[in-house]
Image (spheres, rainbow, N blue to C red):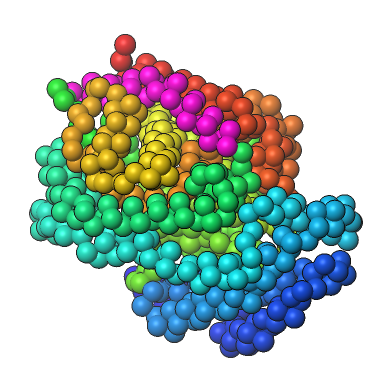
């Protein structure tokens, strides 16, 4: 479908950011002329000048954000449109120029007297920036000289080459062969592999599995070298910034206590028997003598029909999220009616879904809607992101409006859990209930168990490198294989293919990122459970979290919603949710 064929009501109202491209060009020119922050260098020890700097930085940030979001959204409407591709590239250059201009800031602020910084934090005039100043105070031991910061900034593009190289391998160079699928010989791609893996054709799943991993194994030496280089980069940066480990560096940047990471690994590890039970149940229900990893996504419940057109699906989501209150539901309706959402799949449009936004304008959502149950959950998920952005922007000053990545998946997943609970309540058909329970089990398995396994692998790989030992393909594969056996148990066959799975995970090039998916679903399960049992009090507390932006550290923000990740209890609650769901699924499926 061409974009011109889509009805206006199903296109996002991008004109709410800029009415025309000419208006964007005018602001871009203004932004280029506004990069004059070096005039403040050497003067930040004066509170009045520092306040002026912060306010000017805010205004420039708002301008840059609007420019970037507009160019990004236009580019995603049609990647083949070179005009918007060029606009998006120009934003990258503008960011680089701004970053270079700001190189003085961190070293100069780190050099300020501790008493001066503490006085600023206590000064009401700096209330918009108190958390920023607290983080500057925390960063003091880790900030380098201006010259050193400039060197590392200049090396940023080099550091990114490991991720870029893997991207080229993963998206361009992998020698994927053809496979016969639905009567046609087609090239095996990441997308086709996922479709086949979720099908009920076991012979094809096995064939696709062998061919898919065969491609990775053919380049395993190159991928190993690329990943090892990325880990060595992490080790270098952690040492350069005077951290004791790569993990400490990563957690510090998010202002997250190490106990959270350790609690996650500990709780999942102690509750793995339920995961092993699920794998055994899957083997029984599929009726296989041996279960392989290409069977892990095979459907356990067939024949469930749940097809809704976009408008009907959206109404269904609004009903499902009723526990969040009438204000939340009204905002969902506003998003639909006022065209926050780009709905249809069109030629050249970016695949998948996401939420984005910029200061002073409502959030936006990109969809490629298909009439199936998964896409209904996608609406709930992306609008969760959008309304988190909405409430944070509404209730926080610009400097505190943008929440950290650590909590970015919480609101979206709360919506998914609440919607699933609503669907279970509405489901009259036993197969539909089984399907939904299995959907929930697989969501928890993929987001909590699997991502925690990834997190443990990253931890071990970096520890090996930090001890000065090389990361060979043998070490990486044996480390991953051992974790696979621990997490999935003995009811599944552990072959060499799955030992190489680490080689296909792009998130590993952004170290210690994946654990946030696991903490996100943990927090969401706890919040949704509390909302459904405690009602208004829990909803009010949850809205405090949604409105918190980055006014304090993310773990403290979650405490506002009643979730304390510095203890093991929330993780154990999430593990019990998996166990209870599995028990109900087993009962409906006739498994003893």
Locate the N terminus by quadrant.
bottom left
- Residue 278: in magenta span: yes
Residue at the outermost front position: 468
Above/below status of 10 relative to 524: below
Residue nearer the viewer, 190 or 451: 451
- Residue 401: in magenta span: no
Which residue is pictured at 59% across the width and 24% down the height?
569
Q: Is residue 36 left or right of residue 170?
A: right
Residue 482 image position (x, y, % from top left): 29, 31
Q: Picture quarter containing residue 398?
A: bottom right
Which residue is pictured at 34% across the width and 28% down the height?
487
Locate the C terminus by quadrant.
top left
Above/below status of 250 relative to 47: above
Residue nearer the viewer, 227 or 91: 227
Q: How many marks?
A: 0
Residue 14 image position (x, y, % from top left): 56, 72
Can residue 142 be spotted in the picture?
A: yes
Which residue is pictured at 62% across the width and 87% down the height?
29
Can residue 212 be spotted in the picture?
A: no
Which range of residues does the magenta coloring cover? Answer: 258-287
Residue 499 image position (x, y, % from top left): 24, 39
Which residue is pictured at 33% across the width and 52% down the height?
228
Residue 395 image position (x, y, % from top left): 76, 54
Residue nearer the viewer, 322 or 68: 68
């Amino acid at each position: 479908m061409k974009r011109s064929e889509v009805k206006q009501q199903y296109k996002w109202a991008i004109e709410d950011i800029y009415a025309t491209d000419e208006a964007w060009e005018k602001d871009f020119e203004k932004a280029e002329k506004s990069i004059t922050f070096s005039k403040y260098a050497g003067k930040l020890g004066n509170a009045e000048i520092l306040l002026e700097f912060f306010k000017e930085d805010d205004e420039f940030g708002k301008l840059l954000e609007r420019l970037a979001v507009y160019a990004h959204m236009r580019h995603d409407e049609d990647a083949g449109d070179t005009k918007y591709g060029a606009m998006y590239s120009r934003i990258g250059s503008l960011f680089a120029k701004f970053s270079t201009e700001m190189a003085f800031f961190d070293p100069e602020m780190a050099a300020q007297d501790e008493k001066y910084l503490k006085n600023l934090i206590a000064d009401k005039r700096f209330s918009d920036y108190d958390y920023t100043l607290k983080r500057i105070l925390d960063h003091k031991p880790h900030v380098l000289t201006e010259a050193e910061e400039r060197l590392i900034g200049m090396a940023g593009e080099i550091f990114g080459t490991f991720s870029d190289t893997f991207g080229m391998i993963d998206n361009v160079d992998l020698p994927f062969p053809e496979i016969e699928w639905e009567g046609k010989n087609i090239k095996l791609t990441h997308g086709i592999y996922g479709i086949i893996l979720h099908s009920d054709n076991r012979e094809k799943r096995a064939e696709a599995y062998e061919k898919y991993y065969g491609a990775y194994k053919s380049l395993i030496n190159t991928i190993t070298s690329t990943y090892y280089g990325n880990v060595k980069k992490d080790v270098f940066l952690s040492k350069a910034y005077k951290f004791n480990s790569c993990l400490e560096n990563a957690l510090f940047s998010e202002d997250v206590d190490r106990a959270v990471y350790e609690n996650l690994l500990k709780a999942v590890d102690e509750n793995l028997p339920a995961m092993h039970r699920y794998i055994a149940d899957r083997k029984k229900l599929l009726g296989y003598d041996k279960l392989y990893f290409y069977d892990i996504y095979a459907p356990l419940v067939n024949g469930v029909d749940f097809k809704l057109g976009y408008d009907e699906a959206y109404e269904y989501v609004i009903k499902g999220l009723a526990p969040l209150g009438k204000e939340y539901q009204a905002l969902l309706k506003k998003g639909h009616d006022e065209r926050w959402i780009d709905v249809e799949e069109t030629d050249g449009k970016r695949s998948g879904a996401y939420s984005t936004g910029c200061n002073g304008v409502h959030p936006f959502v990109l969809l490629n809607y298909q009439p199936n149950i998964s896409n209904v959950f996608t609406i709930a998920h992306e609008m969760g992101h959008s309304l988190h952005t909405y409430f944070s922007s509404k209730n926080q000053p610009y400097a505190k409006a943008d929440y950290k990545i650590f909590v970015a998946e919480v609101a979206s997943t709360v919506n998914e859990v609440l919607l699933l609970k609503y669907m279970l309540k509405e489901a009259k058909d036993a197969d539909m209930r089984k399907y939904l329970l299995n959907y929930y089990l697989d969501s928890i398995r993929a987001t909590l168990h699997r991502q925690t396994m990834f997190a443990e692998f990253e931890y071990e790989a970096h520890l090996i490198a930090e001890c000065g030992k090389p990361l060979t393909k043998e070490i990486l594969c044996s480390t991953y294989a051992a974790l696979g056996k621990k997490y999935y148990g003995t009811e599944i066959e552990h072959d060499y293919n799955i030992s190489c799975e680490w080689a296909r995970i792009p998130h590993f090039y952004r170290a210690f990122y994946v654990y946030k998916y696991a903490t996100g679903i943990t927090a969401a399960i706890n919040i949704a459970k509390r909302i459904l049992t405690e009602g208004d009090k829990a909803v009010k507390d949850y809205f405090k979290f949604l409105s918190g932006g980055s006014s304090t550290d993310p773990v403290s923000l979650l405490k506002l919603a009643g979730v304390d990740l510095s203890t093991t209890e929330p993780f154990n609650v999430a593990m019990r949710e998996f166990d209870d769901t599995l028990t109900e699924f087993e009962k409906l499926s006739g498994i003893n």
